[in-house]
Image (tube, rainbow, N blue to C red):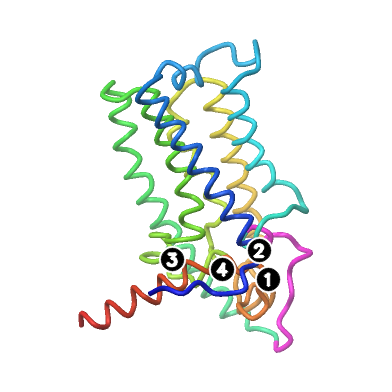
Amino acid sequence: MIRIRKPRSAMFLTYLTRLILRGLLFLGAAYLYFFQRAVLESFTAPGFFQSFGLRQAVWLLLMGGMLLHLLPRVHITMSGLKSRPYTYREPEEGYRRGDLYEYVQTMNLKAWMVLLLWLCFNAIFALLYLLNVIGEAEMLLLTFFYFLSDLICMLVFCPFQTFIMKNRCCVNCRIFDWGHLMMYTPMLFIKSFFSWSLFFTACIVALRWEYVYASHPERFWNGSNAAIRCENCTDKICHIKHPLRDLYRNIRLRIR
């Protein structure tokens, strides 16, 4: 039996609530896909600014989540806030620049691996779309699935963290703010304001992240930033993920 750590932090409960809401949004999109596909397809139809309805409300929800990551002071996890200068805490014992550069090189290589894997995986859907095997409705549904999966990766299980990045948690994740770019990858292939505004805003979020990472890598490694060490973590969003990880490791050891 998996025991969830207590006490649960306010941040964990906030993100758990967001996970449930995203799940409901995906179920709503799936309902539209199977029973009212025309409504789902209308999200990317022309005339976005002619009225205010469901697609404008959904767009505001999706866009608002990204814009939060561009603001200097917001209520998000340290996973994203570690890129801000005011959260940085240099360790009392100091750190070696050589160790930091070694960490950066290792993480950059793993990040390229994730990017290559992601592009190859989504190239399948892009090809199917360009060949008219699937349409805009399928790409929109895929986007909403990615939107849900983003928080599943944060709170429950992340394949990139487990199999490639090998970082302890999202707070120490090198590619944390790539999430929006990953979510809206399918939107690149649909020519509309709804889709392209989301995709290119996601590009801005990712580029800002990469610029800060290149300029101040010390903020992203727990060896050079005491604020992102487990003992100093106040987010504690790992209540589910870490017990599941420990269970997975125990099962592997028993199999061996």
Relative to residue 29, is residue 46 drawn left or right? right
Residue most extreme to the front: 1
Proximity of marks 2 and 1: CB atoms separated by less than 8 Å: yes
The residue lying at 54 percent from left, 12 percent from top is: 46
The residues bearing labels 2 and 4 have C-alpha atoms spaced at a distance of 9 Å
Return the mark for residue 78. 2
Residue most extreme to the bottom: 93
Label 2 SS: helix
The residue singled out by tag 3 in the image is: 165
The residue singled out by tag 1 in the image is: 234
Q: Residues within 10 Å of mark 2 (few under 14, many from 20)?
A: some
Label 3 SS: helix
For the residue marked with disc 1, what is the amino acid?
Answer: Thr
For the residue marked with disc 4, what is the amino acid?
Answer: Asn
Q: Earlier in the sequence, mark 1 or mark 3?
A: 3
Label 4 SS: helix
| Viewer-closest of 71 and 208 | 71
Q: Earlier in the sequence, mark 2 or mark 1?
A: 2
